[in-house]
Structure formats: C-alpha cells, structure tokens
Image: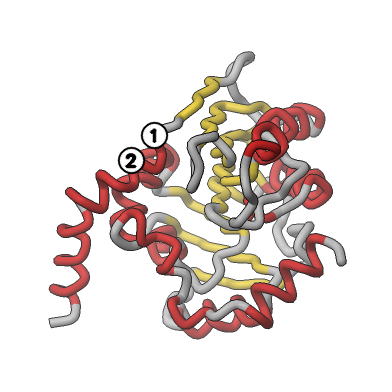
Amino acid sequence: MGNVEFNAGFWGDHYDWSGRGEEWSEMWGGARAQWLGSIYPRISLFLPAKSVLEIAPGYGRWTRFLLSACDGYQGVDLSQECVDACRERFSREKKAVFYKNDGKSLSFAETGCVDFLFSFDSLVHATADVMAAYVPEILRTLSRTGVAFIHHSNWLEVGDRLENVGGRGTDVSADLVSRMILDAGGRVLIQEKINWGHAECNDCLTLFGWVGPAEPKLIENHDFMLEGNNIRKNQSHYSRLAIESSRT
C-alpha cells in the first residue's frame, strides 16, 4: 500500500480523534502552550498574513491560532473525516475554507495567492514521493514574498539507529527536501533539525520561499524535547489559566 493510501486510511478510518490531536502536545502542556512557547516564536515574523494555507490540519489543533492571524485561510487534508471536523468546528469563521485533496497536490489554490503556508506534525509521515510532489505545489501557491514553514521527517539521515515508532517517512531527510526546493526554483531560508522522542534529530523544520539567502541557516537542535519539557513546567500553567478563564 502506498504512503498516501496508508495515511488516508489510518487518519481517516482507524485513528481515534476523540482528543482532537491535543494528545500530541502533552509534552508542552497542551497545544496552546506549544503554539505560544515553541511554534509561534519561530514564525512570528511572518504573521499576521493576508492569506494562509495549512496542509493537514487534522481536527484544527493549529488552525484556531492561524485564523486569528490572517484575512483568509485555506486548509487541506487527505482525510474527509478531518475536513468535515474542521468545517464543523470553524463553521462560524467566514474566512476559512477546507478542502479534501489527494495527499499530494494543492490544485484548489491559485498560483501565487498564499503569503504563509504552514504544516506542523503532519508531513513527518510523508515519504519522499509525496514530498517531491508537494514541494513544487507549495512554491507554486506562494506569492513572491511568501514563505512556507513545514515540519517533515529527517529519518533518512539518522533512522538506522532508531526505532520508528512515530511512523516517520523513512526515505526523507533535511538535505533531500532542501534539494527538492532548490530544484523547483525556490530558496531555503532556515532548516532546523530537531529531536522528537529520540536523542537524534529525526525531524526537521524547513522555512522556504522564492526569495532567500544564497546560503540557508542550518541548525541542529538536540534540545527540542527539552524545550517542550521546560514549556510544560513553566509556561503551560498560564495557557491553562487562559483556557479556564474563557470557560467561565
């Protein structure tokens, strides 16, 4: 079974979405704490943005934060269940539109219409053929000054020493994605290799677009999980208080 078919079946038919994806943010003390303490500091320069596109939002764990930082939002997922869940959850958001795709293309999006493209904790499961299809599509949708921030696998670089319990794309690496971007005419701004459940940097955060430096900034961050642990211990209490206050 191909990677797209497997992911469509797993996330659409077999995964228990009762936690709406919040379970993956437990290390940070919740999705809000993870967004404010870990993700947003990395992308704050590019938000707010006029047009945002999110690949694989799942049940909208990050969508709620992106919606508050854009004029128009498009979300795309290969799982119809996730698309339906997001349409229901954000039904009052007139700026938000959700699409189901084939897991490889962004045919619904106009060329050059996106100012910020985001995908976190989803494309890590994509194999090289999926990434090779997505990268040119991502660049096509970006405006000339737009940027994409994607979280993907780096398993090809370090995986022979690890157990792949998280279902990472085993034939994807930071260097491979970088070459895909350059071959499609884009520029890599930053690549941050991060550890996720391992001592090795088995994942990567890649920031890219049409315009960028001749040489990207390369970071090897073995403390990403430590970052999450510190956010949970020190910052997540404030996020929880904000959530509890909004319910009163």
* Residue 145 badge: none
Q: Which of the 4 image quadrants contains residue 154?
A: top right
Res. 146 in view:
no
Q: Is residue 90 above or below residue 229?
A: below
Could you tell me residue 21's position as x and y percent? Answer: 47, 70
Residue 198 is left or right of residue 45, and the answer is right
Rendered location of residue 97, percent (x, y): 58, 72
Q: In screen coordinates, is 222 left or right of 37? A: right
Q: Residue at x 32, y 54 (%)?
A: 28
Say which quadrant the N terminus sits in: bottom right
Check disc 2 and give the amino acid type: Glu
Q: Which mark is residue 223?
A: 1
Residue at which label 2 appears = 227
- Circle 1 — which element? loop
**Which quadrant does the C terminus fall into?**
bottom left
**Dot 2 alpha-carbon crowd within 10 angstroms: few under 14, some 14 to 19, many 20 or more:** some
Question: Mark 2 and 1 residues: CB-CB less than 8 Å, in contact?
Answer: yes
Query: Can you give x and y, in whole percent of width and height, for residue 86 in the image?
Result: 52, 77
The residue positioned farthest toward the right in the image shown: 1
Asked if residue 99 lies left or right of residue 136, the reply is: left
Residue 187, x across and y down, in percent:
66, 27
Q: CA distance from mark 2 to mark 1?
A: 6 Å
The correct choice, above or below, for 6 with respect to 218 in the image is below
Residue at 60%, 50% in the rendered image: 114
At numbered mark 2, what does the secondary structure look like: helix, strand or loop?
helix
The residue carrying pointer 1 sits among few (fewer than 14), some (14 to 19) or many (20 or more) residues within 10 Å by Cα, namely some
